[in-house]
Structure formats: C-alpha cells, structure tokens
Image (cartoon, rainbow, N blue to C red):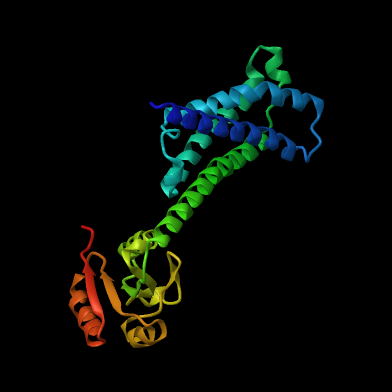
Amino acid sequence: MSLTRQFLSLGKLATEACLVGAAFCLAFVLRFEGTLPTDFARAMLWYLPFVLALKLAVLAGTGRFKAPWRYLNLWEAVRIFTCLWAVSMLLLVWTEVRGLLPWDWAHELILPVGVIIFDLVLCFLGLVGVRSIVRLLNEKREHRAIVKTTGARVPTLLYGAGRAGAMLAKEILARPDSGIDLVGFLDDDEHLFGMVVEGLPVLGCACELDRAVQRYNVRQVIITIAKGQEEATPRIARICEKAGLQTKIIPPLH
C-alpha cells in the first residue's frame, strides 16, 4: 500500500471514529435535553471508548471500511445500518443483564435505552451522510471535467421507464460524453404517467410521442423493454421510425 493510500485510510478511519464518538455523546445530550446529570456524564465517558471500539470493530470486520465512499448506494447504506443495529442490540442486552451482575460499577453506570436509540439514528446519519457528500462531490467533479470536453448532444427519449430504463438513464446521465441529452421517458404503463424516474419525467405512452418530439426537439428514441414484454418492441420501433426518429433498442438484461 502506498503512503498516500495509507494516509487516506487513516483519514477515513479517524473521520468515522470521530463521527461514531460524536453521535454517542450527542445521544446523551439529546436524551437529557441538553442538561446532562453528573452520574450520566460519568457513564457517558466510561462507555464511550467501549462503544467506539465495538462499532469500529464491527464495521471493520464486515468490510465497511474497504468500500469506497464514492460508491455509496442503497445496499451499502443497509449494510451500515445492519452493523450499527447489531451493536445497538448488544447494548440493549447489556442494559438488561447489567442489574444481574455482582459488580457495583455495573449498577451505577446506567446506559439509558433512549441513548441507545438516539445513538443508532445519529451514527447512521453521520456515516451515511459523509459518504453521500463524498459521492456527490466526486460525481460533480467528474461531471464538470467531462462537460468541458463534450460537444452538442442529441435530444433523446427513453421508451420504457422500468428497471432497465432507470439503469440506462442513470448511466447516461453520469456520462455527458455519451452525446445523449435525455429529455424524459415514454411508457405503456399508465401508472407511471406523471412520475419522475432518475430525475426525468414520464411523459406518457406512445400517443404522446409527437407532442414530445415537438416540445423537446427529440431526434432519437432508445427503447428499453422489460423481460416478458419483448413482443411490444417491433410495434414501438415502427411508431418511432414513422415519426422520423432514429431508433435504438437495448436488449433485456437477461
């Protein structure tokens, strides 16, 4: 591992440690509405290193530190929540068995359930929030770099606002150098009309094609048909070709 990567790894670890520690302390403050009793302040300072070490160990053990922040997605957020939830469950178990232990310090150092709940929420928001910021800044930087070298783009409609269409739209929007300027979706599913998919409006079905062409100066259509609807592709392609539009077909992912 190069020296630069080592510094980056240490920086990420230090950032996450600070977020985890700050979330735990803030949870106490919120639980007691800003006025922290002396006994609970002492409990906070006593539990802090153990909670910090436990969370970092769980996150590291599940590989969360190895996942690049700029690639945060929904599943990564779910995995982070699962790790934090597991730690919170351990802390809740501790609050139940603490009173059964023979040690005096275990009876004196109380960890309120409200603190555990606040800590779970705050820690999750902090860890996912910092990753989201890094991803947004990285994508914005890459987008600006690409736009500087990109010429005119072709106004384009996507036919099919399902999963395949959403994935294609996301990829095209992330790559301005593709030469494609997406203006919206068309789809035969009337339940999608008026909705927004990946930031693009679903304008209607095939009957709205001419109106969309005039309004957005559309010059091409990319057809993305979901599995099981392949028989509709020739019909849609003929409609687009009759409108004088360049038509491309993306095969189903399967």
| Quarter of the view holding residue 153 | bottom left
Residue 143 % position (x, y): 43, 57
**Residue 124 at what x, y percent from top left?**
56, 41
Residue 108: x and y, percent?
73, 19
Can residue 88 be seen at all in this image of the molecule?
no
Front residue of this view, candidates 202 and 183: 183
The C terminus is located in which quarter?
Answer: bottom left
**Label tally:** 0
Classify residue 224 as left or right of residue 114.
Answer: left
Quarter of the rendering occupied by the N terminus: top left
Which image quarter: residue 64?
Answer: top left
Q: Position of residue 174 (x, y in %)?
A: 39, 58
| Relative to 35, 45 lies left or right | left
Q: Residue at x 43, y 31 (%)?
A: 5
Residue 147 appears in the figure: yes
Residue 175 quadrant:
bottom left
**Residue shown at the point (45%, 76%) measured from the top left:** 194
In this view, 22 is above or below 130: above
> Which residue sits at x=32%, y=77%?
188
Relative height, residue 150 to residue 99 (above, below): below
Q: Height in image: 82 above or below 187?
A: above
Residue toward you, 40 or 56: 56
Residue at x 42% of width, y 62% of height: 147
